[in-house]
Every structure is written in structure tokens, then in C-alpha cells.
Image (tube, helix red, strand yellow):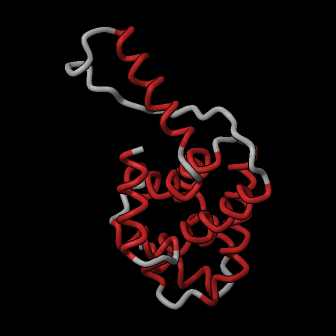
Amino acid sequence: MQRELVERARKGDHDAFAALAAAAISRLDGAARLILRDDDLAADCVQDALLRAWLDLRALRDPDRFEAWLHRLLVRSCYRTASRKRTRGIVEIHGLVIDERAVPDAQHAVAVEDQLDRGFRRLSTEHRTVLVLCHYLGMTMADASAALGVPLGTVQSRLNRATKA
């Protein structure tokens, strides 16, 4: 189904591209928010990635890799934005699910979430990006490597360092 939509979009079908964008936008937005820690900048990066996808769609070699290619465009947009704005802001991790059986009370759950939030804020953009791609978006390390355009070993080392940090 997605391959067919990509093929139609490559031929200029606006509705096919709109369907592809609608299917991907919430994951793109969530990833960009976690990477950049700023809702407005994240929304701009998602729009930039989708615009670049529409303009460069004919250059996509493998329609089955559309989603990975779209994530690569998003990550590059986030990196450009992060390099222009080097401020530290507040990050909120929405949708964090803490296993109630592992946490004895609500106060402890808030403390755990706060500790994760502070740790996430200390990470560099590259380390946050690898965590988001592998754990939030559920990509394999090989897919994250392709999305970032870096060797697999680089993704592995960044993920290891980010997890330790």
C-alpha cells in the first residue's frame, strides 16, 4: 500500500503524498520534539522535512525505504535548526509510561520521570537523536544508521554513550 502511494506521489499525485504525510506526521512531530526540545522549532522542522520530501521525492531510489528517507530528512532539518540555536531549554517527555508495579507510589513515579527528564536534557543533539530513533521510533540500529547517514558503529557508540549518560 505504501509503495503504491509513494509511486503515485513520485508522479505528482498530491493526494497520495498527503496520505503519506498524514500517516507519518505524528511520529515525525514526536521525534522532532524530543530531539529539539522546542515545540515550535519541531513543527518547523517537520514542515521543512515534508517540503523537502515533496520536492525531492523523484530522487528517492527505493520506494520501500520512504519512511527511513523521510526520517533522514527530518533529522537533517533538526540538526540544522539545533546548530543555529544552541540554547538549553526544557524538555518534556510526554507519553512516558512507567510500570506501576515497578514504582511503589505516585511520588516516586514523578521522581523517576524528573530524573529521566534531567538526564535527557544533558544529552547532545546527536545522542538524543539516536535515542529517539532507536527507542521512541523503534528503528533498528541499521535503520537509524541509514536515517542519520553515519556508519553503524557510530550509531552503536552514540547509543551506548547516550544510555550511559
Query: 13 or 58, which lies in front?
Result: 58
Query: 57 or 103, which lies in front?
Result: 103
- Image quadrant where one finds the N terminus: bottom left
Q: Is residue 74 above or below residue 132?
A: below
Q: Is residue 132 left or right of residue 141?
A: right
The picture quadrant where one finds residue 9 is bottom right
Q: Is residue 149 above or below residue 33?
A: below
Residue occupying image coordinates x 57% and y 32%: 92
Q: Is residue 143 above or below residue 135?
A: below
Q: Position of residue 13 (x, y in %)?
A: 66, 79
- Image quadrant where one finds the C terminus: top left
Q: Is residue 63 above or below residue 86?
A: below
Name the outermost residue toward the left.
101
Residue occupying image coordinates x 42% and y 32%: 96
Q: Is residue 139 left or right of residue 101?
A: right
Query: 163 or 109, which lies in front?
Result: 163
Residue occupying image coordinates x 42% and y 17%: 111
The picture quadrant where one finds residue 77 is bottom right
Residue occupying image coordinates x 36% and y 30%: 97
Q: Position of residue 140 (x, y in %)?
A: 33, 65
Q: How many marks?
A: 0
Q: Position of residue 160 (x, y in %)?
A: 35, 56
Q: Is residue 100 left or right of residue 124?
A: left
Q: Position of residue 142 (x, y in %)?
A: 35, 73
